[in-house]
Image (spheres, grey):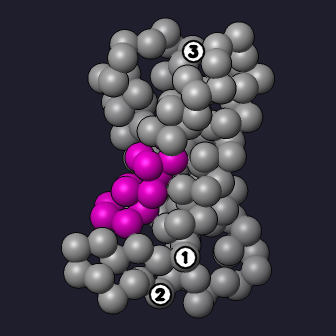
């Protein structure tokens, strides 16, 4: 089971990677970048807090794929980030935009959180 220090480290790193990824894709407003970064921090933080509280040690088993050793824990971070970003964008800075625009940015945030989880902690 990972500790709180590692959980917070992963959340901050996910936020930074998401912010960079979103900023370089289209140069959107600060609100769009901030929303994606916040979602990429909150999603993994919430998911890992749930796993920690529920003693979900079995979720940390990596897939036997050398180039992409994803686990259920990693996947949950991506899913929670996708949900948080979708809500954030849909109710926030991209509320007046087409849904596909919001989802593109939400997917960028989710992919950032997933990849950080898989490869960086």
Q: Is residue 60 left or right of residue 76?
A: left
Residue contact at pointers 1 and 2, CB within 8 angstroms: yes
Which percent across, then down, holds residue 110?
51, 47
Q: For residue 36, which quarter of the picture? A: top right
Distance Cα–Cα, label 3 vs label 1? 30 Å
Q: Is residue 121 above or below residue 59?
A: above
Q: Is residue 50 left or right of residue 106?
A: right
Q: For residue 53, which quarter of the picture? A: bottom right
Distance Cα–Cα, label 3 vs label 2? 36 Å
Label 1 element class: helix
**Crowd class of label 3 (few under 14; some 14 to 19; many from 20; radius 10 Å):** few
**Crowd class of label 2 (few under 14; some 14 to 19; many from 20; radius 10 Å):** few
Distance Cα–Cα, label 1 vs label 2? 7 Å
Which percent across, then down, holds residue 56?
66, 84
Q: Which residue is mark 3?
A: 31
**Crowd class of label 1 (few under 14; some 14 to 19; many from 20; radius 10 Å):** some
Q: Give yes or no for residue 47 being in the magenta stretch.
A: no
Q: Earlier in the sequence, mark 1 or mark 2?
A: 2
Which percent across, then down, holds residue 114?
45, 57
Tell me which secondary structure the magenta stretch mostly adopts.
helix
Q: Which residues are magenta?
A: 109-120
Q: How many marks?
A: 3
Q: Which residue is mark 2?
A: 61
Residue at x 39% of width, y 84% of height: 63
Label 3 element class: helix
Q: Earlier in the sequence, mark 3 or mark 1?
A: 3
Which percent across, then down, holds residue 81?
60, 48
Q: Which residue is mark 1?
A: 72
Residue 69 appears anywhere in the view: yes
């Amino acid at each position: 089971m990972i500790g709180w220090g590692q959980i917070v480290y992963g959340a901050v790193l996910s936020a930074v990677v998401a912010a960079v990824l979103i900023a370089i894709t289209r140069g959107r407003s600060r609100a769009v970048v901030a929303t994606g970064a916040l979602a990429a921090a909150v999603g993994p933080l919430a998911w890992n807090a749930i796993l920690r509280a529920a003693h979900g040690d079995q979720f940390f088993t990596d897939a036997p794929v050398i180039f992409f050793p994803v686990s259920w824990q990693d996947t949950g971070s991506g899913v929670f980030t996708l949900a948080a970003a979708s809500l954030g964008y849909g109710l926030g800075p991209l509320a007046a935009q087409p849904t596909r625009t919001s989802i593109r940015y939400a997917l960028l945030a989710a992919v950032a959180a997933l990849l950080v989880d898989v490869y960086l902690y």
